[in-house]
Image (cartoon, helix red, strand yellow):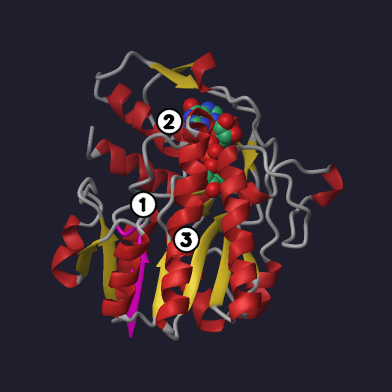
Amino acid sequence: MKALLTGITGFAGSHMTEFLLAKNVEVIGTVRQRSRMDHIRHLLKDIHLYDCELRDSFSVRTLIERVKPDLIFHLAAQSFVPTSWNSPIDTIQNNINCQLNIFEAVRRCGIDCKIQIACSSEVYGRLEPHEIPIKETNPLRPLSPYAVSKVAQDYLGYQYHQSYGLNVIRTRAFNHSGPRRGEHFVTSNFAKQIAQIEKGKQPPVVSVGNLQAQRDFTDVRDVVRAYWLVLEKGEPGECYNIASGTSWSIKEMLDKLLALSTVEIEIKEDPARLRPSDVEIWLGDYSKLHAQTGWRPEIPFDQTLSDLLNYWRERV
Ligand SMILES: C[C@H]1O[C@H](OP(=O)(O)OP(=O)(O)OC[C@H]2O[C@@H](n3cnc4c(=O)[nH]c(N)nc43)[C@H](O)[C@@H]2O)[C@@H](O)[C@@H](O)C1=O
């Protein structure tokens, strides 16, 4: 079996690759000139990489024709919410166009393959208290340009299934973390700062943004297992939440990280880290995914944070 991964050099992509290789699936990934290989260097001898600019329809079609994948995991995206405030057009164009190029290539080449698209809990945006925990049937009220790009990706997945019968499954992952998480995302950012403080490379102050927000964190290794399971057992055209079913405030998450360290550390709010609007609370209901595939989260959040902090301790 052949799996094509977009975003293979990224956080989820590298974990997805490890998961697929352990299942003896042939892994093919797309890279660009500027892709950094740090996360997949240890896997290079076991995978095939193709130069492909996902924004370029010709490049994508050539790749799909050549590879003829059985499975596609579409993980590549501009995924950092604050970047989407600074360059909304770039985020929207990138996230929508890349996916459209994949859909059109699969459709026009007539390839029979299953496609997982990495949508997001960001599509839900603003919530009413009675809507928590969030089900897939909830109205979508996106609160950032990134969230709007994910709504478009999500609905295009639905539409291409309805219109052309493409075998697309939409996953709405809530926040996820673990080793290799990009350093701008909150868990990784705080863990890296703490690791730097422990080594005396930063004064003993952690800079933070909005600590009141509540997030539902799942370990990335559980998330990629869900990506696999939806293609194995999911219903084409459907969407599935991937969540832990537990919510932590960002302050609680920071306290957990601080408790893993022996150093005295102060907390300081940095106004530059606040956003024009921030989703207040996320708590996902993953019962649909569980009923369809048997998936449930296995790695406790404390383990995720400890692995992440140790990851940074080895790198700073
Ligand atoms: C599901 C969704 O999940 C992620 O989006 P995100 O929730 O924006 O992730 P984050 O780690 O940037 O922020 C989480 C929360 O933490 C607050 N926060 C406080 N202080 C800092 C801080 O210092 N840095 C950051 N980054 N956030 C901070 C921040 O205001 C927010 O409330 C992406 O994977 C996205 O691709 C996705 O799809």
Which one is closest to the eye, mark 3 or mark 1? 3
Magenta span main SS = strand
Looking at the image, which residue is at 63% across and 53% down? 151
Which one is closest to the eye, mark 1 or mark 2? 1
Q: Residues within 10 Å of mark 3 (few under 14, many from 20)?
A: many
Which one is closest to the eye, mark 3 or mark 2? 3
| Residue 44 visible in this rendered orientation of the protein | yes
- Point out the tag, 3 or 1, that comes first from the N-terminus: 1
| Residue 7 is one of the magenta-drawn residues | yes
- Point out the tag, 1 or 2, that comes first from the N-terminus: 1
- CB atoms of marks 1 and 2 within 8 Å: no
Q: CA distance from mark 3 to mark 1?
A: 19 Å
Determine whether the residue tagged by mark 3 lies in a helix, strand or loop: helix
Looking at the image, which residue is at 86% across and 48% down? 130
- CB atoms of marks 3 and 1 within 8 Å: no
- CB atoms of marks 3 and 2 within 8 Å: no
Q: Which residue is mark 3?
A: 99
Q: Quadrant of residue 241?
A: bottom right
Three-letter amino acid code of the residue under disc 2 = Phe
Quadrant where the N terminus is found in the figure: bottom left
Q: CA distance from mark 1 to mark 2?
A: 17 Å
Q: Nearer the viewer, residue 56 or 121?
A: 56
Q: Which residue is mark 2?
A: 190
Quadrant where the C terminus is found in the figure: top left
Three-letter amino acid code of the residue under disc 1 = Phe
Determine whether the residue tagged by mark 1 lies in a helix, strand or loop: helix
Residue 76 on image: x %, y %: 40, 55
* Magenta stretch, residue numbers: 1-8
Q: Is residue 230 left or right of residue 25?
A: right
Residue 110 on image: x %, y %: 44, 84
Q: Which residue is mark 1?
A: 11
